[in-house]
Image: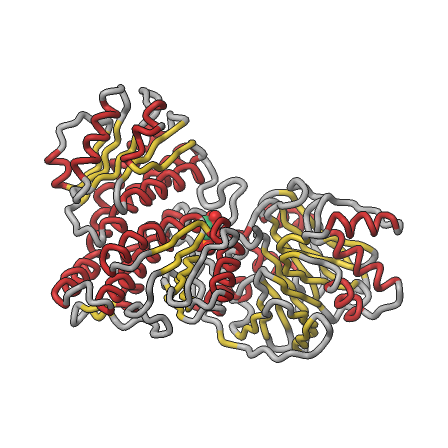
Amino acid sequence: MCGIVGIVGKEPVAERLVDALRRLEYRGYDSAGVATIHDGTMERRRAEGKLFNLEKVLDGEPLPGTIGIAHTRWATHGVPNVTNAHPHFVEGVAVVHNGIIENFSELKEELIAEGAVFESQTDTEVVAHLLAKYTREGLDHQAAMLAMLNRVHGAYALVVMFADDAGTIMAARSGPPLAVGHGKGEMFLGSDAIALSPFTNEITYLVDGDCAVLTAKGAKIMDFSGRPVTRKSQISQAATFLVDKGNHRHFMEKEIYEQPEIISHALSHYVDFAENVVKQPDAAIDFGSVSGLAISACGTAYLSGLVGKYWFERYARLPVEIDVASEFRYREIPLSKSQAALFISQSGETADTLASLRYCKDEGLKIGAIVNVKESTIARESDAIFPILAGPEIGVASTKAFTCQLAVLAALSIAAGRARGTITAEGERAMVKHLVEMPRIMSRVLNEVQPQIEALSREIARFKDVLYLGRGTSFPLAMEGALKLKEISYIHAEGYAAGELKHGPIALIDENMPVIVIAPHDRFFEKTVSNMQEVAARGGKIIFITDERGAAASKLETMATIVLPNVDEIISPMIFALPIQLLAYHTAVFMGTDVDQPRNLAKSVTVE
Ligand code: G6P
């Protein structure tokens, strides 16, 4: 949610700030803005919508200056327009902000009573007004910053600049991430290390409650009372990732097709390919002795956790408590120290997931993070880190992160089963062999089903509503299929447990609502086919995603049958994820929506 950057340097910064914003656009794209100081004058350019609108404005009216801050917005308070776009200016103060200032209404009232005039509807503007007020009252910039930080509550990453000091940028973190980049005679700030990767790979991550003062020479970090604190810098791996689309039309397409290679890389971290056994995972969590697991996550990551629940319970006989993080954090779940908690997050920064993590930590549970960004807050606050090694995922709709999360959960549930004596050595070898074969099968599936799915997507695009059904691990997959379809094609879609069909959704079935049934020929196949029959009997149009055995066993007439190879249950969620991703992708492309940056969404959700 919102990407922020700042540079204090020796060369012109406007273009470099925009370049960094481009790498942060996944965090929001409602508006963008940049401000610099040149010859004692602070100026800004802002534009509604995506970054290229700002680039056009800058082409017409360039901004000189070797110090600047910039922002790409995901709107919370105030509609996306130029007035609400950051940076916000008040009397020589410029502010960019990611997060929410929760007490902004009372601060705004107080400031208005003192004569302040607000331009925007944002919560951010109170920060600029407070800084202006404290400066007017005679505080120096650092003191004004600390005074402001002691008045605002909420979740925020802030970057601030003062027109009368063309050599300093200030920043503060309380929630959303903020990285300080160390250059040669230049210093940088960004919402993540990838944003700064063309400039430097030496990064210091601010922690909650840190305030940083950056000059071209370096960074001074202190707490909100001004006491200096020491934070180590580290060399970030972010620069090694190439962030471009290659030959693909969209990042989402590239990320779908990357999956076989990336999963094989991720698996090599968890599986000994020579011996066909899982490697001992991070020992900070002892799966052999825990009494149960709590899992929490949001969005697609939650759905991968739901598949994980089936695996941990079945293969390791470990009871799993799972909920979406926004509920988990407030449910006051009775937990025991003998349990371990797993948090799944591509970004490692999702606010609700992080809050659930902290709840479990306070309850004394051992914490494990299944994350893509190893340097993220969720990873840093965990006892054990289980990286998914998917590389940067740019498409807002998650694809490769989902299947990599599944691969890691599969490996962990096998490791847990081994540690608990619920999987024999022979069973482990058989399951691992299936995991090892998976990347090859994924490649085959992607190539084979693509033309059929592309053609089918033209049919799907005609409908307003779609129902996805599945049983067992295909149930979370049905929900993921519906989520992918709705988020990028804007077709209303729901994912249901096939057995729940009769308890409501069957009332909706008619020729205007296709029902996509995910049914590999597994233990549940017969039952799911019965549900399909109930749909067919009511004139429903069925799209059947099954395997070769399933296709041979079913005699039902369908609108389309997508046939995948026969695979073992342990890998079927990863294999069956591919057609549902492709279906959402091609439908969205056909409908002409913005596939990589769907409306209203953002990739990293750092507010509640
Ligand atoms: C947003 C994204 C989803 C993602 C979810 C959780 O909603 O659009 O793709 O699954 O956040 O994000 P996380 O980074 O915690 O996995």
Residue 138: where, in percent of width, then height? 88, 67
Q: Residue at x 59, y 53 (%)?
A: 2
When asked about the image quadrant of residue 4, the answer is bottom right
Task: Tell me: residue 342, above or below residue 542.
Answer: below
For this rendering, which residue is in front, 428 or 346?
428
Could you tell me how many numbered marks the image carries? 0
Residue 283: where, in percent of width, then height? 34, 74
Image-based side of 158 in relation to 556, left or right: right
Residue 571: where, in percent of width, then height? 22, 53
Task: Tell me: residue 230, above or below residue 48.
Answer: below
Image-based side of 237 in relation to 278, left or right: right
Image-based side of 326 in relation to 463, left or right: right
When asked about the image quadrant of residue 540, the answer is top left
When asked about the image quadrant of residue 271, the answer is bottom left
Residue 9: where, in percent of width, then height? 67, 70
Q: Residue at x 59, y 49 (%)?
A: 51
For this rendering, which residue is in front, 535 or 96?
535
Colour basis: secondary structure
Q: Quick check: can you spot residue 395?
A: no
Q: Residue at x 55, y 55 (%)?
A: 606
